[in-house]
Amino acid sequence: MSERNRIAVVGLGEVHPPQGMSQRMSASEAARLAIADAGLQTSDIDGAIDLRRTGGGGDRASYSDTFTRFGGITNAQFYFTIGRGGALAGLATAAATGFLDRGLAKYVLCVAAVDDWSKAEESKKHGHRGMSHAEKEGYWGKALGDLRAASHHSWMAARHMAEYGTTSEQLGAISVAQRQWACLNPTARMYGRPITIEDHQSSPWVVEPYHRLDCSLISDGAIAFILTTEDRAKDLKQQPIYVSGQGFGEVNDGLWWEKKNLTHMAVPKARDLAFAQAGITLDDIDTAQLYDCFTGEVLLQLEDYGWAEKGGGGKFVASGATAPGGDGIPVNTGGGLLSNWHLGDAVGFAEAVTQLRGHAGERQVKDAKIALSTGHGGELVSPSMCSIHTTTILTAE
Protein backbone atom coordinates (compact mmCIF):
# COMPACT_ATOMS: atom_id res chain seq x y z
CA MET A 1 0.00 0.00 0.00
CA SER A 2 1.42 3.41 -0.87
CA GLU A 3 1.68 5.89 1.99
CA ARG A 4 -0.60 8.42 0.31
CA ASN A 5 -3.30 5.85 -0.38
CA ARG A 6 -3.34 3.95 2.89
CA ILE A 7 -6.72 2.52 3.79
CA ALA A 8 -8.02 2.55 7.34
CA VAL A 9 -10.69 0.80 9.37
CA VAL A 10 -12.67 3.58 11.05
CA GLY A 11 -15.87 1.92 12.28
CA LEU A 12 -16.65 -1.46 13.83
CA GLY A 13 -19.93 -3.02 14.88
CA GLU A 14 -20.61 -6.49 16.27
CA VAL A 15 -23.97 -8.09 17.05
CA HIS A 16 -24.48 -11.30 18.99
CA PRO A 17 -28.26 -11.60 18.72
CA PRO A 18 -30.63 -13.95 20.48
CA GLN A 19 -31.65 -17.05 18.59
CA GLY A 20 -34.20 -16.33 15.87
CA MET A 21 -32.93 -12.92 14.75
CA SER A 22 -32.69 -12.93 10.97
CA GLN A 23 -29.44 -12.33 9.12
CA ARG A 24 -30.80 -9.11 7.63
CA MET A 25 -31.84 -7.75 11.01
CA SER A 26 -28.49 -8.52 12.64
CA ALA A 27 -26.58 -7.21 9.61
CA SER A 28 -28.54 -3.96 9.72
CA GLU A 29 -27.85 -3.52 13.42
CA ALA A 30 -24.13 -4.23 12.99
CA ALA A 31 -24.04 -1.65 10.19
CA ARG A 32 -25.78 0.91 12.40
CA LEU A 33 -23.25 0.29 15.18
CA ALA A 34 -20.28 0.59 12.82
CA ILE A 35 -21.53 3.86 11.37
CA ALA A 36 -22.10 5.28 14.84
CA ASP A 37 -18.70 3.99 15.98
CA ALA A 38 -17.05 5.97 13.18
CA GLY A 39 -19.06 9.10 13.94
CA LEU A 40 -20.65 9.03 10.48
CA GLN A 41 -24.19 9.17 9.13
CA THR A 42 -25.84 6.60 6.86
CA SER A 43 -25.80 9.23 4.13
CA ASP A 44 -21.98 9.22 4.24
CA ILE A 45 -21.78 5.60 3.11
CA ASP A 46 -21.38 5.53 -0.67
CA GLY A 47 -20.23 1.94 -1.16
CA ALA A 48 -21.13 -1.37 0.47
CA ILE A 49 -19.95 -4.96 0.31
CA ASP A 50 -21.99 -7.94 1.46
CA LEU A 51 -19.66 -10.62 2.88
CA ARG A 52 -21.04 -14.09 2.19
CA ARG A 53 -19.60 -17.57 2.51
CA THR A 54 -19.74 -19.67 -0.64
CA GLY A 55 -17.52 -22.66 -1.46
CA GLY A 56 -17.10 -25.20 1.30
CA GLY A 57 -20.62 -25.03 2.66
CA GLY A 58 -22.70 -25.36 -0.48
CA ASP A 59 -23.94 -22.44 -2.55
CA ARG A 60 -25.74 -19.85 -0.45
CA ALA A 61 -28.21 -17.32 -1.70
CA SER A 62 -27.10 -13.70 -1.98
CA TYR A 63 -29.17 -10.71 -1.07
CA SER A 64 -26.75 -8.04 -2.20
CA ASP A 65 -29.51 -6.33 -4.18
CA THR A 66 -31.47 -5.64 -1.01
CA PHE A 67 -29.13 -5.70 1.97
CA THR A 68 -28.34 -1.97 1.83
CA ARG A 69 -32.03 -1.09 1.97
CA PHE A 70 -32.48 -2.98 5.23
CA GLY A 71 -29.69 -0.89 6.74
CA GLY A 72 -31.10 2.37 5.43
CA ILE A 73 -28.10 2.89 3.14
CA THR A 74 -29.56 4.95 0.31
CA ASN A 75 -26.48 6.74 -0.99
CA ALA A 76 -24.41 3.72 -2.03
CA GLN A 77 -23.08 4.08 -5.57
CA PHE A 78 -22.19 0.39 -5.63
CA TYR A 79 -22.83 -2.71 -3.57
CA PHE A 80 -22.00 -6.31 -4.26
CA THR A 81 -21.28 -9.67 -2.65
CA ILE A 82 -17.84 -11.14 -2.02
CA GLY A 83 -16.49 -14.13 -0.14
CA ARG A 84 -15.01 -17.55 -0.58
CA GLY A 85 -15.53 -20.06 2.19
CA GLY A 86 -14.32 -18.35 5.35
CA ALA A 87 -12.24 -15.77 3.47
CA LEU A 88 -14.50 -12.74 3.85
CA ALA A 89 -12.90 -9.70 5.49
CA GLY A 90 -9.60 -10.08 3.66
CA LEU A 91 -11.24 -10.23 0.25
CA ALA A 92 -13.68 -7.42 1.04
CA THR A 93 -10.86 -5.17 2.23
CA ALA A 94 -8.90 -5.76 -0.97
CA ALA A 95 -11.97 -5.04 -3.10
CA ALA A 96 -12.87 -1.89 -1.19
CA THR A 97 -9.30 -0.61 -1.54
CA GLY A 98 -9.70 -0.43 -5.32
CA PHE A 99 -12.78 1.78 -5.08
CA LEU A 100 -11.26 4.03 -2.42
CA ASP A 101 -7.92 4.37 -4.23
CA ARG A 102 -9.66 5.46 -7.42
CA GLY A 103 -11.91 7.96 -5.71
CA LEU A 104 -15.03 5.97 -6.58
CA ALA A 105 -16.10 5.92 -2.94
CA LYS A 106 -15.36 7.78 0.28
CA TYR A 107 -16.66 5.34 2.89
CA VAL A 108 -17.22 1.64 2.19
CA LEU A 109 -19.34 -0.43 4.55
CA CYS A 110 -18.55 -4.16 4.75
CA VAL A 111 -21.12 -6.39 6.47
CA ALA A 112 -21.21 -10.12 7.26
CA ALA A 113 -24.01 -12.01 8.99
CA VAL A 114 -24.93 -15.61 9.84
CA ASP A 115 -27.84 -17.46 11.42
CA ASP A 116 -26.32 -20.93 11.52
CA TRP A 117 -27.23 -21.52 15.16
CA SER A 118 -30.89 -20.84 14.51
CA LYS A 119 -30.85 -23.07 11.44
CA ALA A 120 -29.21 -25.88 13.41
CA GLU A 121 -31.83 -25.60 16.12
CA GLU A 122 -34.53 -25.77 13.48
CA SER A 123 -32.89 -28.85 11.99
CA LYS A 124 -33.08 -30.59 15.36
CA LYS A 125 -36.86 -30.32 15.26
CA HIS A 126 -36.77 -32.56 12.19
CA GLY A 127 -34.45 -35.12 13.73
CA HIS A 128 -31.27 -33.86 12.07
CA ARG A 129 -27.98 -32.57 13.47
CA GLY A 130 -25.88 -29.62 12.37
CA MET A 131 -26.65 -26.59 10.25
CA SER A 132 -28.40 -26.89 6.91
CA HIS A 133 -26.15 -27.72 3.98
CA ALA A 134 -26.92 -26.91 0.34
CA GLU A 135 -25.26 -29.32 -2.06
CA LYS A 136 -23.69 -27.99 -5.24
CA GLU A 137 -24.06 -29.40 -8.71
CA GLY A 138 -21.55 -32.16 -9.30
CA TYR A 139 -20.86 -32.60 -5.60
CA TRP A 140 -19.63 -36.13 -4.99
CA GLY A 141 -18.76 -36.07 -1.32
CA LYS A 142 -21.68 -38.10 0.02
CA ALA A 143 -20.84 -41.05 -2.16
CA LEU A 144 -17.39 -41.18 -0.54
CA GLY A 145 -18.48 -40.36 3.01
CA ASP A 146 -17.43 -36.71 3.01
CA LEU A 147 -20.54 -35.20 4.52
CA ARG A 148 -19.35 -32.07 6.30
CA ALA A 149 -16.32 -29.81 6.63
CA ALA A 150 -14.92 -31.87 9.51
CA SER A 151 -14.53 -34.79 7.13
CA HIS A 152 -12.13 -33.27 4.64
CA HIS A 153 -10.40 -30.96 7.09
CA SER A 154 -9.55 -33.97 9.22
CA TRP A 155 -7.27 -35.25 6.45
CA MET A 156 -4.84 -32.41 7.16
CA ALA A 157 -4.54 -33.19 10.86
CA ALA A 158 -4.28 -36.93 10.22
CA ARG A 159 -1.50 -36.47 7.67
CA HIS A 160 0.40 -34.12 10.00
CA MET A 161 0.18 -36.75 12.73
CA ALA A 162 1.44 -39.45 10.40
CA GLU A 163 4.39 -37.42 9.12
CA TYR A 164 5.50 -35.58 12.25
CA GLY A 165 4.13 -37.50 15.21
CA THR A 166 1.74 -34.76 16.23
CA THR A 167 -0.68 -35.93 18.92
CA SER A 168 -4.32 -35.33 19.70
CA GLU A 169 -3.26 -33.83 23.02
CA GLN A 170 -1.19 -31.23 21.16
CA LEU A 171 -4.21 -30.29 19.05
CA GLY A 172 -6.12 -30.09 22.31
CA ALA A 173 -3.60 -27.55 23.61
CA ILE A 174 -4.86 -25.17 20.89
CA SER A 175 -8.45 -25.60 22.07
CA VAL A 176 -7.46 -25.07 25.70
CA ALA A 177 -5.42 -21.93 24.92
CA GLN A 178 -8.20 -20.35 22.90
CA ARG A 179 -10.75 -21.17 25.59
CA GLN A 180 -8.46 -19.39 28.06
CA TRP A 181 -8.62 -16.30 25.83
CA ALA A 182 -12.41 -16.66 25.52
CA CYS A 183 -12.72 -16.69 29.30
CA LEU A 184 -11.21 -13.19 29.24
CA ASN A 185 -13.77 -12.01 26.66
CA PRO A 186 -17.25 -11.34 28.08
CA THR A 187 -18.91 -11.46 24.64
CA ALA A 188 -17.48 -14.88 23.72
CA ARG A 189 -19.96 -17.73 23.59
CA MET A 190 -17.68 -19.83 25.78
CA TYR A 191 -16.94 -17.11 28.32
CA GLY A 192 -16.79 -18.56 31.82
CA ARG A 193 -16.48 -22.14 30.54
CA PRO A 194 -12.80 -23.17 30.83
CA ILE A 195 -11.64 -26.55 29.57
CA THR A 196 -8.67 -28.84 30.17
CA ILE A 197 -6.78 -31.28 27.98
CA GLU A 198 -8.77 -34.01 29.72
CA ASP A 199 -12.00 -32.32 28.65
CA HIS A 200 -10.71 -32.22 25.09
CA GLN A 201 -9.73 -35.88 25.10
CA SER A 202 -13.05 -37.00 26.56
CA SER A 203 -15.17 -34.93 24.17
CA PRO A 204 -16.90 -37.07 21.50
CA TRP A 205 -15.23 -37.98 18.26
CA VAL A 206 -16.55 -36.14 15.21
CA VAL A 207 -14.20 -37.48 12.56
CA GLU A 208 -10.89 -38.93 13.70
CA PRO A 209 -8.55 -37.35 14.66
CA TYR A 210 -10.93 -34.53 15.54
CA HIS A 211 -12.85 -34.46 18.79
CA ARG A 212 -15.76 -32.09 19.21
CA LEU A 213 -13.45 -29.59 20.93
CA ASP A 214 -11.25 -29.49 17.82
CA CYS A 215 -14.17 -28.04 15.85
CA SER A 216 -15.33 -24.45 15.55
CA LEU A 217 -18.66 -23.20 16.82
CA ILE A 218 -21.75 -22.35 14.84
CA SER A 219 -23.34 -19.02 15.63
CA ASP A 220 -25.83 -16.31 14.91
CA GLY A 221 -24.53 -12.77 14.57
CA ALA A 222 -23.10 -10.03 12.39
CA ILE A 223 -19.97 -7.93 11.98
CA ALA A 224 -19.67 -4.65 10.10
CA PHE A 225 -16.66 -2.44 9.48
CA ILE A 226 -16.09 0.77 7.54
CA LEU A 227 -13.06 1.53 5.38
CA THR A 228 -11.87 4.89 4.12
CA THR A 229 -8.68 6.67 3.09
CA GLU A 230 -6.07 7.95 5.51
CA ASP A 231 -6.84 11.64 4.99
CA ARG A 232 -10.52 11.15 5.92
CA ALA A 233 -9.75 8.70 8.71
CA LYS A 234 -7.81 11.26 10.73
CA ASP A 235 -10.88 13.44 11.20
CA LEU A 236 -13.20 10.72 12.48
CA LYS A 237 -14.24 9.58 15.92
CA GLN A 238 -12.05 6.49 16.35
CA GLN A 239 -8.32 5.91 16.11
CA PRO A 240 -7.62 4.77 12.53
CA ILE A 241 -6.39 1.20 12.14
CA TYR A 242 -4.47 0.95 8.89
CA VAL A 243 -4.47 -1.88 6.37
CA SER A 244 -0.71 -1.86 5.88
CA GLY A 245 -0.31 -5.03 3.83
CA GLN A 246 -2.31 -7.74 2.10
CA GLY A 247 -1.45 -10.91 0.26
CA PHE A 248 -3.25 -13.89 -1.21
CA GLY A 249 -2.21 -17.44 -1.98
CA GLU A 250 -3.74 -20.49 -3.67
CA VAL A 251 -2.62 -24.09 -3.42
CA ASN A 252 -3.42 -24.74 -7.08
CA ASP A 253 0.27 -24.42 -7.93
CA GLY A 254 0.75 -27.83 -6.31
CA LEU A 255 -0.76 -31.24 -6.86
CA TRP A 256 -3.31 -32.63 -4.41
CA TRP A 257 -2.28 -36.23 -4.95
CA GLU A 258 1.29 -35.52 -3.88
CA LYS A 259 -0.18 -34.81 -0.44
CA LYS A 260 2.02 -31.79 0.35
CA ASN A 261 -1.12 -29.68 0.68
CA LEU A 262 -2.27 -31.87 3.54
CA THR A 263 0.52 -30.51 5.75
CA HIS A 264 1.03 -27.04 4.24
CA MET A 265 -1.32 -24.14 3.56
CA ALA A 266 -1.06 -21.51 0.84
CA VAL A 267 0.76 -19.16 3.20
CA PRO A 268 4.13 -18.25 1.61
CA LYS A 269 2.96 -16.05 -1.27
CA ALA A 270 0.29 -14.36 0.82
CA ARG A 271 2.68 -13.83 3.73
CA ASP A 272 5.54 -12.49 1.64
CA LEU A 273 3.34 -10.02 -0.27
CA ALA A 274 1.70 -8.66 2.87
CA PHE A 275 4.91 -8.45 4.89
CA ALA A 276 6.72 -6.65 2.07
CA GLN A 277 3.93 -4.09 1.69
CA ALA A 278 3.84 -3.46 5.44
CA GLY A 279 7.63 -3.44 5.74
CA ILE A 280 7.63 -5.89 8.64
CA THR A 281 9.03 -9.24 9.68
CA LEU A 282 7.44 -11.98 11.74
CA ASP A 283 9.04 -10.63 14.91
CA ASP A 284 7.16 -7.34 14.52
CA ILE A 285 3.72 -8.96 14.92
CA ASP A 286 2.18 -8.44 18.35
CA THR A 287 -0.87 -10.67 17.95
CA ALA A 288 -2.07 -13.17 15.33
CA GLN A 289 -5.71 -13.85 14.54
CA LEU A 290 -5.37 -17.14 12.65
CA TYR A 291 -8.32 -18.68 10.87
CA ASP A 292 -9.32 -21.62 13.06
CA CYS A 293 -12.21 -23.60 11.63
CA PHE A 294 -10.42 -26.59 13.21
CA THR A 295 -7.37 -26.90 15.45
CA GLY A 296 -5.27 -28.33 12.62
CA GLU A 297 -5.43 -25.11 10.62
CA VAL A 298 -3.95 -23.17 13.54
CA LEU A 299 -1.12 -25.67 13.82
CA LEU A 300 -0.28 -25.51 10.12
CA GLN A 301 -0.30 -21.72 10.05
CA LEU A 302 1.98 -21.43 13.07
CA GLU A 303 4.47 -23.53 11.11
CA ASP A 304 3.93 -21.99 7.69
CA TYR A 305 4.33 -18.44 8.98
CA GLY A 306 7.46 -19.42 10.85
CA TRP A 307 6.65 -19.32 14.56
CA ALA A 308 7.47 -23.03 14.65
CA GLU A 309 9.43 -25.23 12.27
CA LYS A 310 7.49 -27.64 10.08
CA GLY A 311 6.52 -30.54 12.28
CA GLY A 312 7.30 -28.60 15.45
CA GLY A 313 3.93 -26.91 15.85
CA GLY A 314 2.66 -29.54 18.27
CA LYS A 315 5.43 -28.93 20.80
CA PHE A 316 5.06 -25.18 20.32
CA VAL A 317 1.38 -25.08 21.26
CA ALA A 318 1.80 -27.67 24.02
CA SER A 319 4.27 -25.28 25.70
CA GLY A 320 1.51 -22.70 26.08
CA ALA A 321 3.22 -20.32 23.66
CA THR A 322 -0.08 -19.05 22.17
CA ALA A 323 -2.07 -18.85 25.42
CA PRO A 324 -2.48 -15.88 27.77
CA GLY A 325 0.88 -15.27 29.41
CA GLY A 326 2.70 -17.45 26.85
CA ASP A 327 6.16 -16.61 25.58
CA GLY A 328 5.37 -17.12 21.88
CA ILE A 329 2.65 -15.18 20.06
CA PRO A 330 -0.85 -14.34 21.41
CA VAL A 331 -3.16 -16.22 19.02
CA ASN A 332 -6.92 -15.69 18.60
CA THR A 333 -7.16 -13.48 21.64
CA GLY A 334 -10.94 -13.23 21.56
CA GLY A 335 -11.32 -17.01 21.59
CA GLY A 336 -11.40 -17.46 17.83
CA LEU A 337 -13.90 -19.56 15.92
CA LEU A 338 -13.27 -22.39 18.38
CA SER A 339 -14.47 -20.54 21.50
CA ASN A 340 -15.70 -17.03 20.60
CA TRP A 341 -18.10 -17.37 17.67
CA HIS A 342 -18.06 -18.14 13.96
CA LEU A 343 -18.35 -15.68 11.11
CA GLY A 344 -15.37 -16.60 8.95
CA ASP A 345 -12.28 -14.42 9.09
CA ALA A 346 -14.42 -11.41 10.05
CA VAL A 347 -14.16 -12.59 13.67
CA GLY A 348 -10.36 -12.42 13.68
CA PHE A 349 -10.35 -9.19 11.70
CA ALA A 350 -12.67 -7.54 14.24
CA GLU A 351 -10.55 -8.83 17.12
CA ALA A 352 -7.40 -7.46 15.49
CA VAL A 353 -9.01 -4.01 15.22
CA THR A 354 -10.18 -4.21 18.83
CA GLN A 355 -6.69 -5.13 20.06
CA LEU A 356 -4.99 -2.36 18.10
CA ARG A 357 -7.48 0.18 19.41
CA GLY A 358 -6.62 -0.94 22.94
CA HIS A 359 -10.28 -1.81 23.60
CA ALA A 360 -9.86 -5.50 24.48
CA GLY A 361 -10.22 -5.16 28.23
CA GLU A 362 -8.89 -8.03 30.31
CA ARG A 363 -7.54 -9.83 27.24
CA GLN A 364 -5.67 -6.79 25.89
CA VAL A 365 -2.22 -7.55 24.49
CA LYS A 366 0.13 -4.97 25.97
CA ASP A 367 1.35 -2.31 23.53
CA ALA A 368 -0.22 -4.06 20.52
CA LYS A 369 0.66 -2.07 17.39
CA ILE A 370 0.76 -4.68 14.60
CA ALA A 371 -1.74 -7.51 14.11
CA LEU A 372 -1.99 -10.33 11.61
CA SER A 373 -5.42 -11.51 10.44
CA THR A 374 -5.77 -14.53 8.14
CA GLY A 375 -8.55 -16.07 6.09
CA HIS A 376 -9.12 -19.52 4.65
CA GLY A 377 -11.64 -20.96 2.22
CA GLY A 378 -12.64 -22.02 -1.25
CA GLU A 379 -12.34 -25.36 -3.02
CA LEU A 380 -10.40 -26.57 -6.04
CA VAL A 381 -12.37 -29.78 -6.33
CA SER A 382 -15.23 -30.85 -4.17
CA PRO A 383 -14.79 -32.35 -1.67
CA SER A 384 -11.33 -31.15 -0.77
CA MET A 385 -9.46 -28.99 1.67
CA CYS A 386 -9.92 -25.25 1.40
CA SER A 387 -7.42 -23.76 -1.00
CA ILE A 388 -7.22 -19.98 -0.58
CA HIS A 389 -5.21 -18.14 2.08
CA THR A 390 -5.43 -14.43 2.84
CA THR A 391 -2.98 -12.39 4.91
CA THR A 392 -3.88 -8.94 6.22
CA ILE A 393 -1.55 -6.78 8.29
CA LEU A 394 -3.25 -4.14 10.41
CA THR A 395 -1.32 -1.42 12.23
CA ALA A 396 -2.01 1.29 14.78
CA GLU A 397 -0.09 4.55 15.03
Image (cartoon, helix red, strand yellow):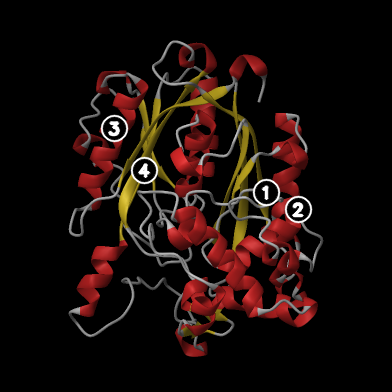
Q: Earlier in the sequence, mark 4 or mark 3?
A: 3
Label 1, on which residue? 329
Instruction: Quarter of the image for the N terminus: give it.
Output: top right
Tag nearer the camera, 4 or 1: 1
Nearer the observer, 294 or 65: 294
Q: Earlier in the sequence, mark 2 or mark 1?
A: 2
Counting other residues with Cα less than 10 Å from the Cα at mark 4, is it few (<14), some (14-19), or many (20 or more)? many
Q: Is residue 342 above or below residue 154?
A: above
Instruction: Quarter of the image for the C terminus: give it.
Output: top right
Q: Earlier in the sequence, mark 1 or mark 3?
A: 3
The percent coordinates of residue 71 (x first, y second) are 22, 35
Residue at 28% x, 43% y is 27
Label 2, on which residue? 307
- The amino acid sitting under disc 3 is Leu
The circle drawn on residue 223 is 4
Tag nearer the camera, 2 or 1: 1
Q: Are marks 3 and 2 in contact (CB under 8 Å)?
A: no
Counting other residues with Cα less than 10 Å from the Cα at mark 3, is it few (<14), some (14-19), or many (20 or more)? many
- The amino acid sitting under disc 4 is Ile
Q: Are marks 2 and 1 in contact (CB under 8 Å)?
A: yes
